[in-house]
Image (cartoon, grey):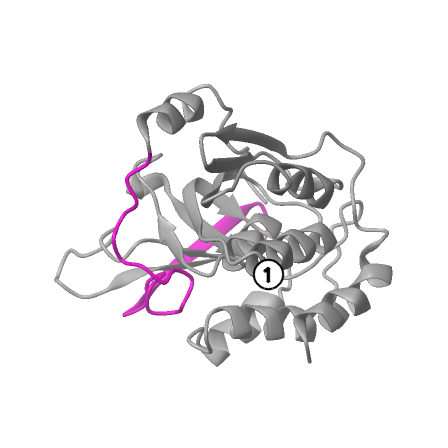
Amino acid sequence: MPYQRLIALAACALAFVAPAAKAMDFHRVGDVLVLSGPVTGNELVQLRNHLAGDPVRLVLLHESPGGDLWNGYQVGNRIRSEGLPTAVSGKCESACGLIFLGGTERSFSDGRPLALTMVGLHGAHTTDTQQPLSELAPRMAWVIRSLTGNKYPPDLLQRTVYTRNAQDIVYSFHPSRFRPDGTRKGVIECLKQDISFKCAMLDGLDAMAIGVITRREVLALPEAVKQLLQTLPLAPEGN
């Protein structure tokens, strides 16, 4: 199923999910476009406006809790169609993770410490009742599987998109994040347990192994971009 067809089918189903809140912040530093904060509604318009100006060479996702799934699909699709690479700084969850996957090349950056940099993916849910939307899971699974080059493990993919709780999430870290015994460790699955979370590390997996990133090298950001990041708020806890 073509990606454009996929997101078109999701439009009507996701119309009631979008919250009414301040849109994602867009900051331009040279040829780097920094996106931070929640995904809420008019991100595609902002992206189009920025792309209409001087060339963008990199889209940097910084400290975003995610948000509206429809807009996540749309922005990620536009980034992919423009052939742009993406990088992540700090926490990038939910719809932000899908935007990040739209990059033709994907990497972690030195904008935040690697220990605090992660990409989180989870299934769709409503914003008001927090009810999982399992009917949207097959399309989301197709997107994640396709954009990760079929590297995302099938069993983990099923658990990622068919969540039992709206706060269940799978975090992917850089390969160097967890290496106490020389093995690759960097994927953590967190499941809501009443009022707490139970998180388990999945041995042998990391962001590179499951196709979330395509480049192992940590991207060194321009100093001007790092200075901007220091002024931006951190993503709130939760997803």
Q: How many badges with numbers are in the image?
A: 1
Which residue is depicted at the point 87% across and 61% down? 12
Residue 173 at what x, y percent from top left? 35, 53
Q: Element under label 1?
A: helix
Which residue is depicted at the point 73% across and 41% down? 45
Could you tell me which quadrant the C terminus lies in?
top right
Residue 20 at what x, y percent from top left? 81, 35
Residue furthest front as drawn: 54
Which residue is depicted at the point 44% across and 23% down? 228
Which residue is depicted at the point 45% across and 73% down? 152
Residue 41 at what x, y percent from top left? 75, 42
Label 1: how many residues lie within 10 Å, few (<14), some (14-19) or many (20+)? Answer: few
Q: Quadrant of residue 30?
A: top left
- Of residues 218 and 91, which is closer to you in this image? 218
Residue furthest left as drawn: 181
The residue indicated by pointer 1 is 81
- Residue 163 horizontal side relative to residue 178, left or right: right
Q: Quadrant of residue 149?
A: bottom left
Q: Which residues are magenta?
A: 193-221
Asked if residue 134 can be seen in this view, the reply is: no
Q: Amino acid at mark 1?
A: Ser
- Residue 2 horizontal side relative to residue 147, left or right: right
Asked if residue 54 can be seen in this view, the reply is: yes
- Of residues 233 and 131, which is closer to you in this image? 233
Q: Main secondary structure of the magenta part?
A: loop
Residue 192 at what x, y percent from top left? 56, 54
- Above or below, 233 relative to 186: above
Could you tell me which quadrant the N terminus lies in?
bottom right
